[in-house]
Amino acid sequence: SDLAIAESLQNAFHAAAQKVLPVVVEVNVVEVVRQNASRSISPFDFFFGQTPGGQGQGREFQRQGLGSGVLVGRDAETVYVLTNYHVVGTASEIQVRLYDKREYQAKLVGGDQRMDLALVSFQTREEVPTAVLGNSDALRVGDWVIAVGNPFGFESSVTAGIVSALNRRAENGSGIADLTDFIQTDASINSGNSGGALVNLRGEVVGINTWIASQSGGSIGIRSEERRVGKECRSRW
């Protein structure tokens, strides 16, 4: 019956969500930002020009940020998390919070700003689940996909949509990573989703949530973009 078909699809969403939720983490970062301090003009500046240190001493302050990440592998006691470079690339402190609320201090292993991908790691002897990576090359326009992340700090949020287009490119000068193509989807993502997982109905990770094409800076039903992963990602990381 039609109801049985609808319930079968619903069960597929249930199974995919339960498979991916434990492998998507919250990534909290602290970045040290330096701001030049303005300095009042002195009589010496008027007569002799700007004195040494004319830009002022400046000051440093800490800025907190929030993103998401995907548990992708483990080597002995080292666990690896894949996320966006713009989430962790300039962070002085990185903390990873798992789905079950465990928290770990992490460090940047490496990253590629032009791909907007980064790998961080943390140490633990405890059991930690890892994601199953799918093949984004097998995606077709119209496929169902699920986005998982921490929008605005709302942990482990799940949204669904379809693959709207493939092989999208960022415009030159947009500030968006320009060394890759993108999967376009109408699954809603917002600030805090960056670095989270885009998965197929099998619960396999096929993309990393990366950016939103929106005048408001949030997902308002227009579109969102996910970075592709697949065989290339498995071999690289």
Image (cartoon, rainbow, N blue to C red):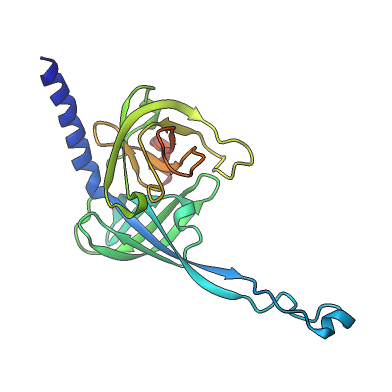
Q: Is residue 32 above or below residue 116?
A: below
Identity of the residue furthest to the top in this view: 1
The image shows a total of numbered marks equal to 0
Q: Position of residue 96 (x, y in %)?
A: 32, 60
Q: Residue at x 44, y 25 (%)?
A: 165
Provide residue 115's location: percent of width, then percent of height.
51, 44
> Can residue 127 be seen here?
yes
Q: In the picture provided, is 190 more to the left or to the right than 174?
A: left
The residue located at (49%, 43%) in the rendering is 216
Q: On the rendered image, what quadrant is the N terminus found in? A: top left
Provide residue 132's location: percent of width, then percent of height: 27, 41
Note whether 18 is above or below 140 in the view shown.
below
Mark yes or no: residue 130 visible. no
- Above or below residue 213? Residue 43 is below
- Horizontal side, residue 127 vs residue 137: left or right: left
Q: Position of residue 28 (x, y in %)?
A: 37, 61
In the image shown, does 151 or 146 lie closer to the viewer? 151
Residue 216 horizontal side relative to residue 103, left or right: right
Q: Is residue 51 above or below residue 78?
A: below
Residue shown at the point (70%, 78%) measured from the top left: 39
Residue sticking out furthest to the right: 47
User: Residue drawn 63% across and 76% down?
Assistant: 58
Residue 218 vs residue 4, the one in the foreground? 218
Q: Quadrant of residue 121?
A: bottom left
